Image (cartoon, rainbow, N blue to C red):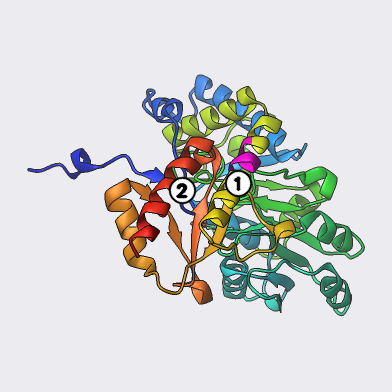
Amino acid sequence: MKNLLDGIEEILLMGPGPSHVPPEIYDAMTRKTLGYLDPYFIEIMDDIQILLRKLLNTKNTVTFPVSGTGSSGMETCFVNLIEPKDSVLILVNGVFGKRMIEVASRLRAHVTPIEFEWGTPILEEKVETEIFKQDYKIVAAVHAETSTGVKNPIENIAKIVKNTNSLFLVDCVTSLGGIQVNVDDWGLDAVYSGSQKCLSCPPGLAPVTFSEEAFSTVLNRNQKVPNFYLDVSLISEYWSGEKKRTYHHTAPSNMLYAFYQALQLIFNEGIENVFKRHNDSHKELVKRLEEMDLQLIVEKPYRLPMLNAVRIPDNVDDVKTRQFLRDNYKIEIGGGLGTLAGKIWRIGLMGSTARLENVERLSRALIQILKNK
Ligand SMILES: Cc1ncc(COP(=O)(O)O)c(C=O)c1O
């Protein structure tokens, strides 16, 4: 029987994730699978926690990768913190803010959304006027809105949230590993991310961290966390080095090797160098796009380096162009989501993809394709 795996091609992943996976990470995944309580595996888990805390700039004990993609990180944060009828304020300027509303509503929270125009950032002044109207248990926002390429001013919003009794829950799926995420200094209470963006792993893990206050909120719930698999108090008993480790679910060991290797690569390169590589690639991409008369939809101060949302010219077919790029140049870029579908391309410079040679390769391809329009 034909094995379809033999037909997988090398596609340069320049979309909204997954990003390019370096050979060291594929290599890590082929190491021998160990049992979930094997002492050597536990040593690897301990090191993962140390490195992850360093990347998140936190001392939070409750810091580990959840088994699942970025959305499982989102579910984990909300399902552990929300009890029915809790008030939740969600700041929305794209698809992933909207997904937060969906997740929180399913948990029967009373959700108040504040919406901002897509392609523009969350406005602190608006948050400041709304936030004191009610006592919200949670305020939630997305740091890097992958659907629009906007960087939200999380540090400044955190200062506002600090003047309330609310916990601040932040999506760092696309930001972590590409720009600063300072969990402790900024005062973030529950943060999640994903393995397949700036960490350059395949999809499958969602790092999360809970502040002491957030974790004690979980421990003092009136009702059990309604989801066994994502209950951080139970998962913590497996990840914590202090007590005897308790089986919760079978750890995806080879994915965790990949994740460990990704963290190693980041710190071997040096975190500041990693951020600079993202920024330099972004600047070069913007320059090349402007030379082609292509415009970014986000104003300069709010642009993400790792996700560049480009307006598609009127005479250009979105889907056909991306398909052509994929088939003939072996490069993937993303299309728009939600209201921006068909209107923008999303060019990712995430993790190992963020390199000048990749910008060069994509620019050359786009010049040729657009010339023939
Ligand atoms: C900002 C943001 N949040 C959440 C998610 C959901 O992550 P996943 O698709 O890995 O479940 C994504 C995925 O693109 C994202 O970009």
Q: Residue at x 67, y 65 (%)?
A: 223
Where does residue 22 sit, x and y in percent of width and height?
Answer: 45, 31
The magenta segment: 277-282
Image-quadrant location for residue 114: bottom right
Instruction: Kindly identify the amino acid type of the residue bearing the numbered disc 1.
Output: His
Instruction: Kindly identify the amino acid type of the residue bearing the numbered disc 2.
Output: Ser
266 to 180, vertically: above or below: above
In magenta stretch: residue 51: no
What residue sits right under mark 1 in the picture? 282
Where does residue 259 sit, x and y in percent of width and height?
Answer: 52, 34
Q: Which mark is residue 37?
A: none
Whether residue 230 is visible to the viewer of this picture, yes or no, is: no
Cα–Cα span, label 2 and label 1? 12 Å
Q: Mark 2 vs ligand 1: CB under 8 Å?
A: no
Q: Horizontal placement of 281 versus 254: left or right? A: right
| Residue count near mark 1 (Cα–Cα under 10 Å), binned few <14, some 14–19, many ≥20 | many
Q: Residue at x 79, y 47 (%)?
A: 212
338 to 294, vertically: above or below: below
Taking depth in this image into account, of 194 and 243 the one nearest to the observer is 194
243 to 234, vertically: above or below: above
Where the C terminus falls, by quadrant?
bottom left
Taking depth in this image into account, of 351 and 181 the one nearest to the observer is 351
Disc 1 on helix, strand or loop? Answer: helix
What residue sits right under mark 2 in the picture? 363
